[in-house]
Image (tube, rainbow, N blue to C red):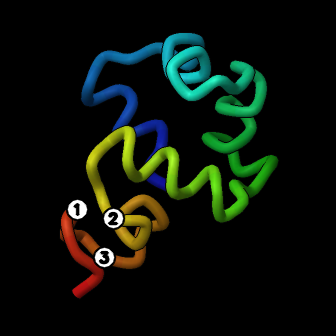
Amino acid sequence: MRLKELRKQRCISQLKLAMDLHMNQNSISRYETGEREADYRTLILLANYFDVSIDYLLERTDNPKTNK
Protein backbone atom coordinates (compact mmCIF):
# COMPACT_ATOMS: atom_id res chain seq x y z
CA MET A 1 0.00 0.00 0.00
CA ARG A 2 1.22 3.52 -0.76
CA LEU A 3 0.05 4.91 2.56
CA LYS A 4 3.51 5.74 3.94
CA GLU A 5 4.59 7.31 0.65
CA LEU A 6 1.49 9.53 0.47
CA ARG A 7 1.76 10.51 4.12
CA LYS A 8 5.44 11.44 3.84
CA GLN A 9 4.89 13.42 0.61
CA ARG A 10 2.45 15.60 2.51
CA CYS A 11 4.60 15.80 5.66
CA ILE A 12 1.87 14.26 7.81
CA SER A 13 2.80 12.25 10.88
CA GLN A 14 1.17 8.94 11.66
CA LEU A 15 -0.37 10.53 14.72
CA LYS A 16 -1.90 13.43 12.78
CA LEU A 17 -3.32 11.08 10.17
CA ALA A 18 -4.74 8.84 12.87
CA MET A 19 -6.31 11.80 14.67
CA ASP A 20 -7.76 13.22 11.44
CA LEU A 21 -9.36 9.85 10.63
CA HIS A 22 -10.41 9.06 14.22
CA MET A 23 -8.12 6.04 14.36
CA ASN A 24 -5.14 5.17 16.49
CA GLN A 25 -1.52 5.63 15.45
CA ASN A 26 -0.74 1.96 15.94
CA SER A 27 -3.25 1.01 13.22
CA ILE A 28 -1.62 3.44 10.77
CA SER A 29 1.78 1.96 11.57
CA ARG A 30 0.53 -1.57 10.99
CA TYR A 31 -1.07 -0.62 7.66
CA GLU A 32 2.22 0.91 6.56
CA THR A 33 4.31 -2.13 7.52
CA GLY A 34 1.83 -4.62 6.11
CA GLU A 35 1.15 -6.21 9.50
CA ARG A 36 -2.52 -5.37 9.04
CA GLU A 37 -4.74 -4.93 5.99
CA ALA A 38 -7.21 -2.08 5.80
CA ASP A 39 -10.87 -2.98 5.49
CA TYR A 40 -13.07 -1.48 2.80
CA ARG A 41 -14.28 1.41 4.97
CA THR A 42 -10.71 2.33 5.90
CA LEU A 43 -9.55 2.18 2.28
CA ILE A 44 -12.29 4.64 1.36
CA LEU A 45 -11.31 6.96 4.24
CA LEU A 46 -7.64 6.89 3.24
CA ALA A 47 -8.34 7.37 -0.48
CA ASN A 48 -10.65 10.30 0.25
CA TYR A 49 -8.17 11.84 2.70
CA PHE A 50 -5.34 11.78 0.16
CA ASP A 51 -7.65 12.44 -2.82
CA VAL A 52 -6.50 9.35 -4.71
CA SER A 53 -8.24 6.26 -6.01
CA ILE A 54 -8.30 3.07 -3.99
CA ASP A 55 -6.49 1.35 -6.87
CA TYR A 56 -3.68 3.89 -6.58
CA LEU A 57 -3.53 3.43 -2.81
CA LEU A 58 -3.28 -0.34 -3.31
CA GLU A 59 -0.61 0.07 -6.02
CA ARG A 60 -2.84 -1.38 -8.74
CA THR A 61 -2.22 1.69 -10.91
CA ASP A 62 0.25 4.54 -11.10
CA ASN A 63 -2.51 7.04 -11.92
CA PRO A 64 -3.68 8.58 -8.62
CA LYS A 65 -7.07 9.70 -9.92
CA THR A 66 -8.55 6.74 -11.77
CA ASN A 67 -8.33 2.99 -11.89
CA LYS A 68 -7.51 2.97 -15.61
Circles 2 and 1 in contact, beta carbons < 8 Å: yes
N-terminal of the pair, mark 3 or mark 2, is 2
Q: Position of residue 18 (x, y in %)?
A: 60, 22
Q: Is residue 48 above or below residue 44?
A: above
Nearest to viewer (mark 3 / mark 2): 2
Tell me the SS state at disc 2: loop
Q: Is residue 14 left or right of residue 9?
A: right
Q: Which residue is mark 1?
A: 64
Q: Is residue 14 above or below residue 4?
A: above
Label 3 – label 2 distance at C-alpha = 9 Å
Q: Is residue 1 above or below residue 55?
A: above
Please state which of residues 31 and 20 is positioned toward the viewer in this rendering.
20
Q: Residue at x 40, y 72 (%)?
A: 55
Tell me the SS state at disc 1: loop
Q: Is residue 11 above or below residue 55?
A: above
Q: Residues within 10 Å of mark 2 (few under 14, many from 20)?
A: many
Give the amino acid type for the residue marked by disc 1 in the picture. Answer: Pro
Q: Which residue is mark 2?
A: 53
Answer with the quarter of the image where residue 12 lies: top left
Q: Position of residue 57 (x, y in %)?
A: 42, 59
Label 2 – label 1 distance at C-alpha = 6 Å
Q: Which residue is mark 3?
A: 61
Please state which of residues 31 and 42 is positioned toward the viewer in this rendering.
42
N-terminal of the pair, mark 2 or mark 1, is 2
Q: Position of residue 51 (x, y in %)?
A: 27, 48
